[in-house]
Image (cartoon, rainbow, N blue to C red):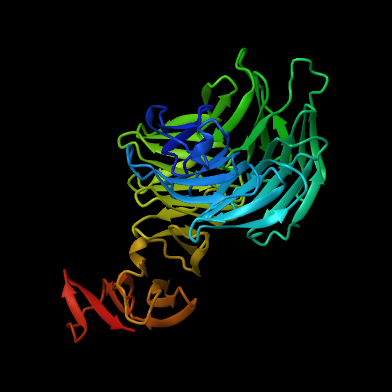
Amino acid sequence: MAWSANSGRFAVCTAERVVLLYDEHGERRDKFSTKPADAKYGRKSYVVKGMAFSPDSTKIAIGQTDNIVYVYRIGEEWGDKKVICNKFIQMSAVTCLLWPAENSIVFGLAEGKVRLANTKNNKSSTIYGTDSYVVSLASNVSGKGILSGHADGTIVRYFFDDEGSGESQGKLVVHPCPPYALAWALNSIVAAGCDKKIVAYGKEGNVIQTFDYSRDSSEKEFTTAAASPGGQAVVIGSYDRLRVLNWSPRRGAWEEAKPKEIPHLYTITSLAWKRDGSRICAGTLCGGVEQFDCCLRRSIYKNKFEMTYVGPSQVIVKNLSTGTRVVLKSHYGYEIDEVKILGKDRYLVAHTSDTLLLGDINSNKLSEVAWQGSGGNEKFFFDNENVCMIFNAGELTLVEYGSNDILGSVRTEFVNPHLVSVRINERQQRGMEDNKRLAYLIDIKTIATVDLVGNYSVGTVSHDSKIDWLELNETGHKLLFRDKKMRVRPSRGCRERNGKHEVLMTF
C-alpha cells in the first residue's frame, strides 16, 4: 500500500496483482493491472513486493519478484491512461521499495543488494551490497537517508545527504532476528521481528529501549512497521493487533499507547501513513484494508477552522467553508503549543519551546524560525502579504513567509506598521535577483533604510518635525514620508495633502 505525497491518492495492490486507487475519503476511483517481466510466464508468475508514489504523485513504482521494477505514469486526474514510462530489469527478485526523492527509486534485492533506479536516464546502479536478503527498507523524515534490514539481522544506514548530522554510514547494528518491521523515527530507529521484541536504537546503534512481549502468549511475530510523517510515532503490526509507540520529548523516551486489538483481523501485512499524518491504513493477510484516524486532539477555531493535532509537532488546519488544508509542522520535532489564526483569518501563528511557526493560509507558505520564549508578549502585524512584522521588547523582527531564516532584525521603539515599510522583490529589476529593503524610524524624526539581502544600512534621513507615516516604493529606491507640523510651502519633491506634507526622497 502507498499514500501519495499530496495525500490525495491511496494505492492498494491486491494478491491478484491489481492496483486499486482510492481518493482520500476511501472511495475507489480507479484501478489498473500490473504486468509480468515476460508475458510468456503469465500473470501469476510473480508477486508484487513493493510500491511507492513519486514525490509529484503522478507515478507509481512497482517492485516485483520476477526481477523487475516498473514505473507507471498514472496522470494527475482519475481515469487518465496508465502508461509504463520506466522499467528496470534486475538479476534477482525485488523484495522492497521506496521512492524518497525525485527521479530516485531505492529498492532491495533477494541477493542482498540495495540499488538506485534513476527514472531520468532509465538506469539503475548499486548503492551498496551485502550477502543477505533485504527484508525491509525505511527512510528518514526528510527522505535523505535510508535504512535496510537484512535476513541475518543486519541494519545498514546510507545517506544521500546527512544534512550536517555527522552520523555514520554503513553497518549500524545486528538485530537479534530479521527486522521485517523497521522504521526510522525522528529520534531513533525502531526494529522488530519474529522474537516478539521491539527495540529502539540510538543514532549510532546503541539500544535505547526494549519492549519485550516474548512471554505474552497472545502476541505473534511483528511483520511490519511505519513511522508517522513527523517521526514522533511508530505503529508496529502483528497478529490481530497494532502497537503504537509515541515519542515523549520531555522524557526523551518512547511511551507505549494502548494497543489496538481487532479480533479475527489476522496478520497485518502492510502499513501506510497518510502524508499529512491524519490517517494510517493497515492491510491484512485476508485482503482487508482498515483505515484509522490519527489524532491527539481536535478543536474548532472561531467556528471557521478545524484544528487537528496529529502529533505533538504537527497540526492540520482545515478551512470549514472551503475545505482547504494547511499542514503546520515543526521541522525540529518541537511540541506545538496553541495555534492562532490572525490577520483577517489568513495567517497562522504558533509557538514551540525554541521556535516560532508562521504561515500564510492562502499561499500555503510556511516558516519556522528560531525564537526564544518571550511570554507571548509579541505584537504581530500582517499588513504586508510577503512578510510578518513582529515587535517584541523594543525590537522589530521580519520573517518572510516560506523562509526558515529571520529576514532581518532592528531596534526601534515605534510599534506601528505605518512607520515601517518592507519591499520584497515586488518589481523585477535588471541585474538584480533579490531586492529586499526596509525603512523604519530610529527616532521620531529619523528614518533609516536597510538592504535586507546584504544586511547593511543604505542611509538615513533626518527631519525637523515628527514623522507619522512612511513608505518605500516597489523597488525600495524611493521613500515617501509625511509629517504633521511642517507649515512651509511645498517645494520640489514635496506635495501637500490635507494640510500635511509628504516628502519624496530618492536613494
Number of residue marks: 0
Toward the top, the furthest residue is 263
Q: Residue 254's spot in the image, x, y percent? A: 72, 35
Residue 12's place in the image compared with 395, above or below, is above
The one nearer the camera, 234 or 238, is: 238
Q: Residue 484's spot in the image, x, y percent? A: 26, 71
Is any atom of residue 188 visible in this view?
no
Q: Residue 170's spot in the image, x, y percent? A: 76, 55
Residue 320's place in the image compared with 386, above or below, is above
Q: Residue 108's spot in the image, x, y percent? A: 65, 46
Residue 162's place in the image compared with 267, above or below, is below
Question: What's the residue at 59%, 40% (across, down)?
Answer: 66
Is any atom of residue 43 visible in this view?
yes
Locate residue 314: give its quadrant: top right
Residue 251's place in the image compared with 116, above or below, is above
Left or right: where does residue 278 sit relative to residue 496? right
